[in-house]
Amino acid sequence: MLPLIPFPSFSEPLAQSLVGEWTCQPKNGDAAFTWVVSDNLPGGWLIGEGYEDNSLSSVETWSFNSEGQLMERRQFASNGAFIQLSVVERSEETLSSHGELTRRDGESIPVQHFLRRINANQIEATWEVDEGSGWIVVADEVCMHRER
């Protein structure tokens, strides 16, 4: 059996602040949803779960590199979509990720995701896709941290 190698502590400025329960409100007026992010393997993984109408609607994993920075995100949605993202830019307040969204029918399109911390209890999340005519926003949300 191989020995377990401990993961480093978080060095990603935004990572630890994502842990918790969030109420996310789309800016277009669609129904709010709950996003729960947990640190199931400290320094190794973040696990996210999305809930709409008290039903699980998505599951995601975030992995870290050897320096403790978020690197890869995989998300599975109840509509059959699968998203693969890689972090391409980061700062203390933002994470930008680019990748691919694969629909249930197998069609894949480019996708990008932007997270921006507004303050300790609020973040903005924007999703964009390019179906061949340039980037368009498909989701623009404000998420508020919920006290448990």
Image (tube, rainbow, N blue to C red):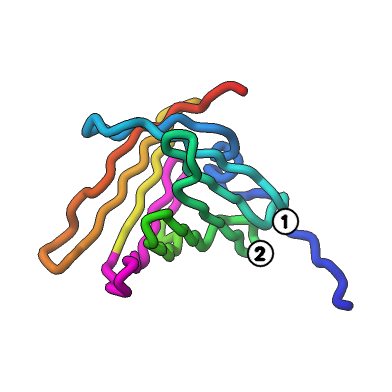
Please, what is the dominant secondary structure of the magenta stretch?
strand
Q: Mark 2 points at which residue?
A: 66
Residue occupying the point 51% across, 63% down: 72
Residue 52 visible somewhere in the drawing: yes
- Given residues 37 and 42, the one toward you in this image is 37
- Given residues 95 and 146, the one toward you in this image is 146
Which is more N-terminal, label 1 or label 2?
1
Mark drawn on residue 8:
1
Which residues make up the magenta segment? 90-110
- Given residues 136 and 68, the one toward you in this image is 136
Across and down, in percent, residue 109 comes to 27, 68
Residue at the extreme bottom: 1
In-image side of 104 versus 117 (left or right):
left
Q: Quadrant of the C terminus?
A: top right
Residue occupying the point 51% across, 52% down: 59
- Given residues 59 and 123, the one toward you in this image is 59
Disc 1 secondary structure class: loop
Question: Quarter-wise, where is residue 70 in the image?
Answer: bottom right
How crowded is the residue under tag 1: few (<14 C-alpha within 10 Å), some, or many (20+)? Answer: some
Q: Which amino acid does label 1 sit on?
A: Pro
In-image side of 38 versus 102 (left or right):
right
Question: Quarter-wise, where is residue 23 in the image?
Answer: top left
Residue 92 visible somewhere in the drawing: no
Across and down, in percent, residue 110 comes to 28, 66
Q: Does the magenta stretch include residue 91?
A: yes
Across and down, in percent, residue 136 comes to 18, 53
Residue at the extreme top: 147
